[in-house]
Amino acid sequence: MTASNTAAAPDILTEDEVAAMLRCSVRHVQNLRIAGRLPFWRVGRIVRYHRPAIMQALDRNFTVRARR
């Protein structure tokens, strides 16, 4: 992607960018994708994520556990 393409599509994320956003490993992002917990799309071998869809998925999957 060139600089102009990146500026035009800031909501399109790579696995590295999603991992940095979630503060986890790339492997964990891949595991979430494989488990169907993170929405994504694939073009050939390239996997991309849409930032608003990731945020919605996090909101849906977010739980607060009571302390014991």
Image: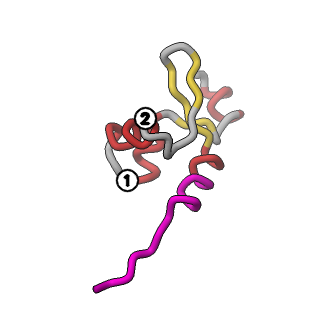
Q: Farthest right residue?
A: 8
Residue appearing at x 44%, y 74% in the figure = 64
Residue appearing at x 32%, y 44% in the figure = 25
Residue 15 in the magenta stretch? The answer is: no
Q: Quadrant of residue 4?
A: top right
In the foreground, 42 or 66: 66
In the foreground, 19 or 29: 29
In the foreground, 62 or 46: 62
Give the amino acid at mark 1: Arg
Range covered by the magenta-colored residues: 55-68
Q: Which mark is residue 34?
A: 2
Report the residue marked by disc 1.
Answer: 23
Image coords of residue 44 (percent x, y): 54, 13
Residue appearing at x 37%, y 39% in the figure = 31
Image coords of residue 47 (percent x, y): 51, 26
Within 10 Å of disc 2 (Cα), the crowding (few <14, some 14-19, many 20+) is: few
